[in-house]
Image: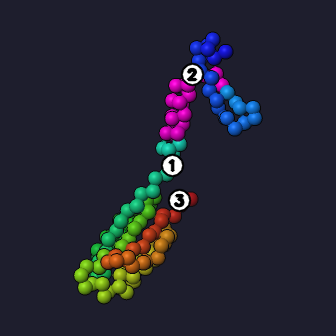
């Protein structure tokens, strides 16, 4: 029947009993399938991670300025990676860095929730904050 119509016999679901076949143009079938997959891929959410870097002795004005940017990032739906970078001997101020990150987490409580508490990795103390879903 497929040869008479100048089309292809395409096996749709081989695991069914009996197997399901359809008479159609195979190239068109592949094209439609790729189109469907592309549409599904475009609907998938892409996670954007924005970084904000502090020093252990960041003063109030700089902190407020960076906090404002963090709020903007979280409102836009991006994840936030806040970290304190310790240069040279400033690693002795670990507590100050942790206090700074916890203060940031507390200030951003209404915009996002802490995904990972401050953790020291090498010369960086890192904390992740994910945005709250908009209601």
Q: Earlier in the sequence, mark 1 or mark 3?
A: 1
- Which residue appears farthest toward the left when viewing the image? 88
Q: Position of residue 65 (x, y in %)?
A: 31, 70
Q: Callout 1 environment at 10 Å: few (<14), some (14 to 19), or many (20+)? A: few
Q: Position of residue 35 (x, y in %)?
A: 51, 34
Asked whether residue 59 is in view, the answer is no
Colouring style: rainbow
Separation of marks 1 and 2 at Cα, in angstroms: 29 Å
Query: What secondary structure prevails in the magenta region?
Result: helix
Q: What label does residue 44 carry, if any?
A: 1
Q: Residue at x 61, y 14 (%)?
A: 3
Q: Position of residue 64 (x, y in %)?
A: 33, 73
Which residue is labeled 2 in the image? 25
Considering only vertical position in the picture, is 37 above or below 134?
Answer: above
Asked whether residue 81 is in view, the answer is yes
- Magenta stretch in the rendered image: 22-39
Q: Earlier in the sequence, mark 1 or mark 2?
A: 2
Q: Residue at x 56, y 28 (%)?
A: 29
Q: Callout 2 environment at 10 Å: few (<14), some (14 to 19), or many (20+)? A: some
Q: What label does residue 134 carry, if any?
A: 3
């Amino acid at each position: 029947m497929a040869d008479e119509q100048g089309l292809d016999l395409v096996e749709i679901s081989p695991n069914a009993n009996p197997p399901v076949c359809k008479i159609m143009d195979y190239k068109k079938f592949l094209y439609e399938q790729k189109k469907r997959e592309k549409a599904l891929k475009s609907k998938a959410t892409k996670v954007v991670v924005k970084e904000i870097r502090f020093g252990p002795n960041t003063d109030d004005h700089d902190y407020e300025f960076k906090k404002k940017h963090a709020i903007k990032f979280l409102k836009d739906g991006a994840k936030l990676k806040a970290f304190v970078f310790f240069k040279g001997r400033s690693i002795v101020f670990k507590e100050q860095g942790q206090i700074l990150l916890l203060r940031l987490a507390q200030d951003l409580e209404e915009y996002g929730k802490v995904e990972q508490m401050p953790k020291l990795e090498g010369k960086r103390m890192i904390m992740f904050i994910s945005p709250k879903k908009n209601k």
